[in-house]
Amino acid sequence: MRTTRRAFLGGSAATVSAAVLGAPALAQAKARVVVLGGGFAGATCARELHRAEPGLVVTLVEENPIYTACPFSNSVIAGLRDIAAQRFGYEAIGAEGISVAQDRARAVDPQRRLVSLSSGAALGYDRLVLAPGIDFRWGTLPGYDEAASALVPHAWKADEQTLLLRRQLEAMADGGTVVISAPANPYRCPPGPYERASLIAYYLKSKKPRSKLIILDAKDSFSKQRLFHAGWQQLYPGLLEWVPLSSGGKVTRVDPATGTLVTDFATYKADVANVIPPQRAGGIAETAGVADQTGWCPIDPITFESRLQPGIHVIGDAAIAGAMPKSAFAANAEAKVCAAAVAARLRGETPSPPKLINNCYSLVAPDYGISVAGVYHPVNGQLADVEGAGGLSPADTAPDFRALEARYAEAWFRTITTETFA
């Protein structure tokens, strides 16, 4: 059973790619597709479009010259990995013949099909793909705004914030208290706060064993919960405490100057505080008119075309993708399906209903991995789980299997970053 599931998931990326690459070329077309955002969703979509239809004029717009990946950034925080291993450039994408514009999209005109850039340039398009990732809902948590993140890091966009949280942990005295505030759903990477807590607990156990870590949670349940709890009980008894919503875990106010987090029932003074704030789709989504009142972007699950603005597709963390979570693997899969759908639309064809796969690894310790897999298909206008497909790592298994899952996680990261950026 494990071997079958693993083999299936291992071949999933190739299967989706084949579906895109098998499409017939556009007959002498010079249709223009602009992709905004150069993460796992946007960079993958640009490459898949170009490879599928060499006649397309594909432009990838990304403000930053270097992309810093969020998967495995928790290992950087825990001192297990160098930040350089998380950084990727766009040279290989440009070398394929894709135009890479290092610029920021400041406006979208859906009627004129025009993207305005901060440099003053404007890009016309026949189809637009938005992959803007997430932004934060600053100010919705009293006391915590962008300025406060310089004292109490969120580290939910990898790079300088990641390093800030790492430095704070290194500077904390043995016997200190680390407090993590986990947000309510939805947000990027559902198991991310709990992997972070696990790896920080590993660091504390190894370097500062008299310390304590507390997770204050705005939820009563979370992804891979039973597996995380089993790992915590085995590896970090007495060190790591989880306070769920029903026990007063929701943070209602933050005092960044003192590192104090307040809930309805208690006040927690942290030596190191990490607040993961409420989130929404990246700002250009609202500017383009594809975000609804939730702050996220409703899409057609077959094409990922916006339900609010025809001709614009939304992929990755910004999209409301039903049962499919906001993860790097999901973003990569959505990008391939979207690329196939865009090419079909430009040929005047009807895209086929897809099946999408997500596989998510988490580390409870460097040699202790757990995973969850899911398969999704369109049902009644949303992406829903395929019943009986996917599943969790086994609850009771030998340490060598947990170590194997940790190695699978490393291999997954190498594979997806190579496919996206190399």
Image: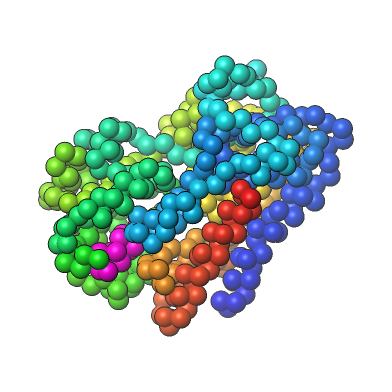
User: At 64% across and 53% down in the image, what residue appears?
Assistant: 419
Q: Nearer the viewer, residue 191 or 218?
A: 191
User: At 42% across and 72% down in the image, what residue appears?
Assistant: 367
| Segment tinted magenta in the rendering | 196-206
In the displayed structure, 155 sits above or below 389; it is above
**Image location (x, y in percent) of residue 217:** 27, 53
Is 2 within the magenta?
A: no
**Residue 195's image quarter?**
bottom left
In the image: residue 220, left or right of residue 59: left
Name, please, the residue furthest toward the right. Answer: 27
**Image location (x, y in percent) of residue 34:** 65, 31
**Image location (x, y in percent) of residue 348:** 80, 35
Q: Nearer the viewer, residue 407 or 136?
A: 407
In the displayed structure, 21 sits above or below 201; it is above
Q: Nearer the viewer, residue 186 or 386?
A: 186
How many labels sit on residues? 0
User: At 25% across and 54% down in the image, what residue appears?
Assistant: 169
In the image: residue 166, left or right of residue 51: left
In the displayed structure, 280 sits above or below 180; it is above
Secondary structure mostly seen in the magenta stretch: helix
**Image location (x, y in percent) of residue 266:** 12, 50
User: At 30% across and 66% down in the image, what residue appears?
Assistant: 202
Any part of residue 20 in sight: yes
